[in-house]
């Protein structure tokens, strides 16, 4: 078996550039918490006229995690994020991870049958969406295993929960988790379905941390800072 050191391209490797990178074996959300500890007042995400600092985002996602845990979301449970690119999507993503759940992003352009397939294929029992997309959820919810529906922008619809209420009610202390970053699934990303129905690609926490590390300049951190 060829050793890594014998790979032919290494003889052209620039001096001072490491041949191997050691990635931290941590949950993805620890990157956010680490930045919140280091730079709590720096802007983490901005969308139109709104923004969240690392400290604010870390607190909100911890509150959501506590709320989801109270609602029955446990380690390994799948939660669909049916939202456009908004700050609520980011809060939902990291909040689900902190609860130990698996994030299942759904295309906000989906129609009922497409959403139903993804809900059933992923066996998701909870979904976070908004008022504009709720009619699509309502159309198919009785044909799925959905038990919990959280809306990001309204509390005027019966039998659904308000994200704002969760974020103001629950404590900023997420559940304690026993995670194995290289094994535990953090997200299921569905393919485009060009040759059939979309299929879920399972990504571990470690997969996502490595991806983030490869964009370390954008994130403003490196493995030594975690």
Image (cartoon, rainbow, N blue to C red):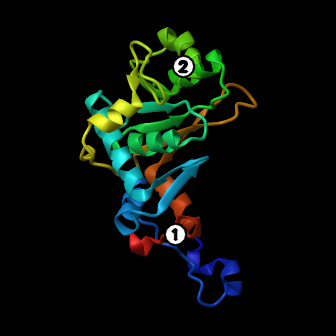
Q: Position of residue 157 (x, y in %)?
A: 44, 15
| Horizontal and vertical percent position of residue 191 | 65, 36
Quadrant in which residue 102 is drawn: top left
Using the rendered image of the protein, determine whether residue 77 is visible from the camera's viewpoint: no
When the figure is inspected, residue 12 is found, relative to residue 29, above or below; the finding is below
Residue at coordinates 55% horizontally, 30% vertically from top-left?
Answer: 82
In the image: residue 185, left or right of residue 179:
right
Question: In the rendered image of this protein, does residue 110 appear above or below residue 219?
Answer: above
Residue named by callout 2: 134
Helix, strand or loop at mark 1:
loop
Q: Position of residue 224 (x, y in %)?
A: 41, 75
Residue 162 falls left or right of residue 8:
left
Residue linked to disc 1: 220
Instruction: Identify the image quadrant of the N terminus.
Output: bottom right
User: Furthest residue to the bottom?
Assistant: 15
Res. 76 in view: yes
Residue at point 63%, 16% (across, down): 113
């Amino acid at each position: 078996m060829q050793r890594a050191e014998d790979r032919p391209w290494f003889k052209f490797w620039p001096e001072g550039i490491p041949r191997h990178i050691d990635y931290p074996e941590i949950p993805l959300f620890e990157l956010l918490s680490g930045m919140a500890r280091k730079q709590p007042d720096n802007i983490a995400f901005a969308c139109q006229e709104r923004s969240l600092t690392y400290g604010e985002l870390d607190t909100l996602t911890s509150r959501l995690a506590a709320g989801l845990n109270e609602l029955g979301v446990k380690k390994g449970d799948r939660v669909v994020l049916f939202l456009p690119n908004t700050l609520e999507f980011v809060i939902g993503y990291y909040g689900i991870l902190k609860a130990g759940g698996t994030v299942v992003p759904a295309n906000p352009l989906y129609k009922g049958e497409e959403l139903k397939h993804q809900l059933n294929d992923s066996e998701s029992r909870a979904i976070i969406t908004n008022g504009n997309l709720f009619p699509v959820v309502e159309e198919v919810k009785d044909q799925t295993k959905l038990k919990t529906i959280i809306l990001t922008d309204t509390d005027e619809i019966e039998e659904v929960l308000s994200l704002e209420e969760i974020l103001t009610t629950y404590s900023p202390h997420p559940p304690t988790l026993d995670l194995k970053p290289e094994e535990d699934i953090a997200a299921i990303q569905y393919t485009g379905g060009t040759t059939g129905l979309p299929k879920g690609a399972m990504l571990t926490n470690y997969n996502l941390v490595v991806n983030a590390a490869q964009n370390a300049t954008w994130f403003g951190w490196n493995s030594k800072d975690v």
